[in-house]
Image (spheres, rainbow, N blue to C red):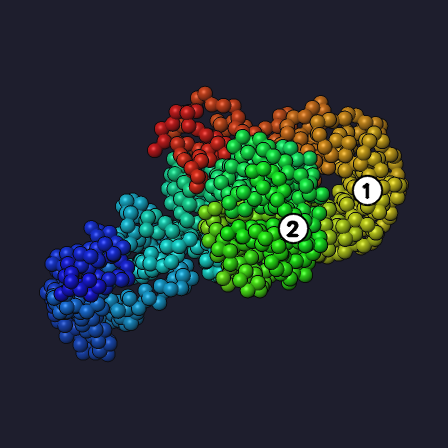
Amino acid sequence: MNCTFHINSPISLICIAPHKCQCQRKLCVECQYDHEVDIKKHTIPINKFHERLMKKLKELKLDETSQIIEERTEFKSMLSHTESMMKNIWEELSQSIIQLYDMIEKQNKSYLDIINQNINLNETSNTELEKLVQILEGQTLNVWNVEKKFYLNQLKKIRNLWGQEIKSLSEKIKEMNEIFQQQFKSSITTIKQFQVEAEVMKEDLFEMLSQIQNIDESIYNNILEILRRQKASDILGFLSKQSNFYELLINEQMNTSDAIEIIKKITIVLSNIQDHQFNKDDYSSGTYYKARQDLIKKLAKNKVLLTSIDEKFIQSGSNGLNLLLGMKIDLRNQSLENIRIKNTSLIGGHFVKCNLSGSELDNVDISGLNLNGAQLFKCKWKNLKIQELNKLDGHSDIVWQVCISPQGNKLASGSSDNTIRLWDVKTGQQNAQLEGHDDAVISVCFSPEGNTLASGSNDNSIRLWDVITGEQKAKLDGHQFAVISVCFSPDGNTLASGSRDNSIRLWDVKTGQQKVQLDGHTSYVYSVCFSPDGMTLASGSNDNSIRLWDVITKEQKVQLDGHTSYVYSVCFSPDGSKLASGSYDKSIRLWDIKTLQQRVQLDGHTSYIQSVCFSPDGNTLASGSSDNSIRLWDVKTGQQKVQLDGHTNDVNSVCFSPDGNTLASGSNDNSIRLWDVKSEQQQVYLDGHTNDVNSVCFSPDGNTLASVSNDNSIRIWDVKTGQQKVQLDGHTNDVNSVCFSPDGNTLASGSNDNSIRLWDVITRQQIAKLDGHCDYVRSVCFSPDGNTLASGSYDNSIRIWDVKTRQQKVQLDGHTNDVNSVCFSPDGNTLASGSNDNSIRLWDVIAGQQITKLDGHISYIQSVCFSPQGNTLASGSRDNSIRLWDVKTRQQKVQLDGHTNDVNSVCFSPDGNTLASGSNDNSIRLWNVITGEQIAKFDGHISYIKSICFSPDGNTLASGSRDSSIRLWIVKTGIETQPLYCNYNEILKKWKSPILLNNLPNSVNPNNTILVISKDPFLLANGALILQGQFLTTWGEDLQRFFESRGSCILDNLLQINYE
């Protein structure tokens, strides 16, 4: 018989692969090249197929009936002697036994018939052939054989019990008969039933996993242990071929029938997962975003074990781990040795102190992983993605525009710091800094060959730069006001510029001379762009219009109206058929160049559109907005494909790389970001504030941290995991200060909405709103007994509130400017306050009177804090200094200098020996209170430190910053301040590996950050052990040095190890 698909080729092979065969299992020579299976492993010559099938049946002895006949006879003999006595019982039992034996013979015969009736495989129907393959390679016969043994063993038990007293035997037989009746109804397994059961679960992943959700985790552990002990690499093959596997699971809690049922369920689920998209595709991609979210919602209520040993299940195991992270399962202190993960996202995963030795990762996003204390021996990680390396920091002011070179290897950026910077797109390293402009650089553009860069500036000039040497080649003067946009023609001979002088100018690149001035716009020209053929120039203006100009005739061709406000950006599609425009009216519009009509309007951004850019294939449009987001749009459908969040301020510019895989963006947050737009991975939104973190405060038990922000929210965090426990909303403006009550049950907050609010920490509800201040509330503080709350405000007053009655008790007036900070003394009798009048004041809380005024600072007092003993007061000021005051003598004891900018926050350690300070110089410093010496400096925040707070045990310091993040730092106060792990010896003692310690460095990298809470992923690896592994990015860079900068220990070449 010839092949159905290749009619001239005879069928020569039978496919036995465990899948739904597209070739209907009959393969010819040509099918071998089309069929996606291992020919050697999963095909059998047609003449050998039947031989192997008969051999299989012979091994299982399905055609031997002598034992069954003999046992049937014995039962008849015994039953005949007791027929009169047990007539009623016999009728029921006899029927059951007959059914059982008949069923056994019927089952045996059904398999024999299938085989004997299908000797000529060429003529066998597809359905029958599928059954034969299931008999040969599936688990059907094995399961049936075990069930048959079970029934026969039970019958043998009945025969052995027969010699007992009749009454006792009668009860036993009756009981057994009931068991047989129940088993007969539920346990008969045929090929058809197996297929139907499998098909029911095959499509719905949740339903599939639900089949095994109630299986105890200990059973999985037993199965995994057996698989490891037997060195099984093919799980399905092992489960289906090892009939004694069932016996291995039997213990006091599990009988044979339960073991059979559990293994059957697990085998079916694994078989279906193997063929499911869950085991083929990346479920962290945008394509599966909704399915993934639905699955997380369903699985969040069930503990589902998703694991992988067999290489065939790597993708499903990877997706399972991604789901566990989405469900926020605590994965700390887990043994994850030798796991293999690919094509997924592990963003923000907490793997603290996990053993990941021998793990293999491929094409995985590891941004924001917490690997503190992890063991990373002999890891093979490749094609890693890490968003931190895609954030380019260097500019000290707004980044106005970014442009990727035609070769795709360089990126240029222009900034309000008056510089242009050139970056390596792969490594993110700055290659050059071009200086010459006297004001902000608003626009940059590479020439088509990539050797020249044009820049436009607020200094009214255009400059041309040699990209290779970094030298200025020419300066083009002519515009009367700022040059907002520059663009090269496709042939590179002409440069167009748009300016705040309302004009467009065309320049000869070779001579540097102006060729023509195009007038028509009645306000600023924000954007200019050449069509791909270079014949047309588009411009967008502050006059709300888009204009198209004929480059040859220098005449305006048409004016496109539609936007209701300023047009900030215009961009031609690569084929020149469409023009995109972005506007202050928050809309993007696509225009048909032939008809000159608007084709579609893209809405979604919540603020004005700063930049638009087509992908090289023209199918995607990127937009950057003042709502801080980037969005990608499907040009054909007009639908939003994805939203990219990460910038903390306006996105001014977006630009695709020539291959379309990368998108660059520049922002008012001074940063440049590179986005992988081809992976289609749905962005993972990490917990974190979206604006300045103004205040942080530990709960009295140290397990919880509260924070407040300019995003108007209060958030409560788990200190160990960094997971957000709750978000408290209610304030209608920036929240400036937060404080726990001494019992930890109440939280107070002060805001720019002029109110103070009290929150029940347990119920997470607002319990009171205290009104009275007529300006921003800058600081709140509970008294030590928790009965009183103090508040300081921009209305120059301090107010004292009764927490129980929620009434104002007294108002303390005296400061002549804003009150920034208030703090109770440990005995609760004195209140300190710091103000923008440059003074500190001490108040008698009971009398409501000012005790004294401490002068010395020459600028605003930002923070005041009493020592735990109450004898010293610390103050931080905008004069960059910290001062310590003797509370009794009211004299300054010492001045601590070191910070180079405002000191915003000061806090004593619980033992009073250390003072921490946070500053606008982006650093945190620790000071010895006795000697006045600086003992440590912590760097990590990329913007102002606005608040710091010690944990109650003094081992941890929390900080909140203008960079929108919270960091937790390890600080061991006392005689000496040490980093997270003071030396390699201390780390290695934790591991039971045969490690010989000699000639080790005294300390790891002194990066004390143990936790970062931020929407911006930040990888942590403090105290992680790295040995003989590789951690390669998509561009081939090994991240070991990056890990080392985060506090990891690189053990290679440092010690002698015998690690197996």
Disc 1 is placed on an element classified as strand
Label 1 amino acid? Val
Residue 1036: where, in percent of width, then height? 42, 37
Q: The N terminus lies in which quarter of the figure?
A: bottom left
Foreground residue among 107 and 248: 107
Say few, some or many: other residues with alpha carbon within 10 Å of mark 2 (under 14 / 14 to 19 / 20 or more).
Answer: some
Report which residue position mark 2 lands on: 518
Report which residue position mark 1 lands on: 819
User: What distance separates the C-alpha of mark 1 from that of mark 2?
Assistant: 56 Å
Residue 205: where, in percent of width, then height? 40, 61
- Above or below residue 377? Residue 97 is below
In the image, taking residue 329 as reference, residue 919 lies left or right, namely: right
The extreme front residue here reads: 553
Q: Residue at x 60, y 43 (%)?
A: 507
Say few, some or many: other residues with alpha carbon within 10 Å of mark 1 (under 14 / 14 to 19 / 20 or more).
Answer: many
Q: Residue at x 54, y 42 (%)?
A: 493
Foreground residue among 705 and 435: 435
Disc 2 is placed on an element classified as strand
Residue 392: where, in percent of width, then height? 56, 39
Give the quadrant of residue 200. bottom left
- Above or below residue 399? Residue 870 is above
Foreground residue among 544 and 646: 544
Q: Which disc is residue 448 wearing?
A: none
Residue 766: where, in percent of width, then height? 71, 57
Q: Residue at x 83, y 27 (%)?
A: 891
